[in-house]
Image (cartoon, rainbow, N blue to C red):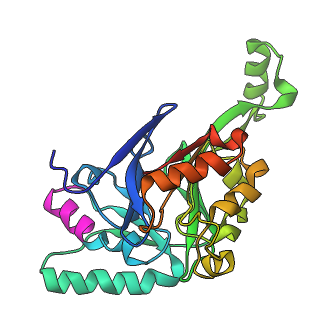
Amino acid sequence: MLENLPVKSLPFQGYTIEGYSRAAVQSYWRIPELRVGFDMGGTPWSFMGTQTYFITHAHLDHMAALPAYVARRKMMKMEPPTIYVPEEVYEATDRMLKSWQRLDRGRMLCELIPAKAGVEYELSREYVVTAFPTKHTVPSLGYILWERRRKLKPEYQGLSGDEIRDIKLSGQEVAAEVRIPIVCYCGDTAPQGLDGDPAIYQAKILITEMTFFRPEHRKEKIHKFGHTHLDDIIERAEKFQNELIVLGHFSTRYMDKQIKAAVEKRLPASLKERVHLWL
C-alpha cells in the first residue's frame, strides 16, 4: 500500500480512529469499521475504500482533496462515493466538481448530498447520522453517528419467550428502537458548537478541535474565527460523558511537547484520563 500522506491510528473498543489533523494544513479522518469518513483536506491511498464522507465545511484544509478522491475512485473502478456537505455550499461544490471534470476530462461520479442541521441521514439498518450546527467563519456542521438497536419494551421485560411470542402473534409490537450515539465529529468550531446537541457530550467517541491553548491568546478573537481554546474544554469538563475524547487540529505554531505539557498541567484529572491528543 502506498502511503503518500501521514495517518495516525488509534484502536478503541472495536473501532479504529484513523487520520491526521493540523490547523491550516490538512484534516481527514475515518473509522473503517463504520465505513465512514469525516472531512477531506487530504486523501491517503489507504482511505480510498471508504465510500461515505461527511464534510463539515469548505475550507481548503478540510475539503481540498475532494476532486482527487472522486476521480481516483473512478480510476480504481470503485462505486461512486456518497459525499455530504453543508447545504449552503452544495451548489458551489457541485460546480467545482463539474469544473474539474472539464479540466481533467474525466467524469466526476459521486452522489453529492446537501446536509442540514437537524436532519437525519440513513446509512444502513444499523446506523444513521444526524447533523448539528457548529460555529465557524463559513457555513459548517458537525455530525453524530448513531447505532440503532431493537430492545424489548419495558412492559414486556420479564415475560417468558412463549408469552412474548404470543404477544407478537397477536399483532402487537414488543420491541422499540433504541439509539446509541457512537461517534461525534465536530470539525472546526467555536465552543458554541460543542453545545449544539446534548448527544455531543454523550457519544462514545468525541472528535473535536482544540486549536489554541496558551493563556495569552485572547479567547474572544479565537471564538470570532471559529475555534476552541483549552479553557473552553476545561469550562465544560463536567459535561463530557464521552468514553474517549480526541482533541486535534492544533495550531502549527505549537510543538507537540508544548501541547502535552499544557494539557497535563491544566486539564482536570477526571477528563484527562479520557483525552487523547492527536499529535
Q: Is residue 238 positioned above or below 22 on the image?
A: above
Q: Residue at x 73, y 26 (%)?
A: 169
Q: Is residue 57 positioned above or below 124 on the image?
A: below
Specify the segment rendered in magenta.
68-78
| 271 or 2, nearer to the observer | 271
Q: Residue at x 73, y 14 (%)?
A: 161
Q: Is residue 217 positioned above or below 202 on the image?
A: below
Return the x and y of residue 207 as percentages of the image width and height. Answer: 54, 53
User: Could you tell me which quadrant the N terminus lies in?
Assistant: top left
**Magenta stretch: dominant secondary structure:** helix
Query: Can residue 145 be seen by looking at this rendering?
Result: no
Q: Position of 202 compared to 21: left or right?
A: right
Does 186 appear in magenta? no
Q: Residue at x 78, y 34 (%)?
A: 172
Q: Quadrant of residue 166?
A: top right
Q: Residue at x 17, y 86 (%)?
A: 102
Does 73 appear in magenta? yes
Return the x and y of residue 48 as percentages of the image width and height. Answer: 26, 54
Q: Quadrant of residue 213?
A: bottom right
Q: Quadrant of residue 96?
A: bottom left
Return the x and y of residue 249 as percentages of the image width and height. Answer: 47, 62
Q: Position of 166 compared to 206: left or right?
A: right
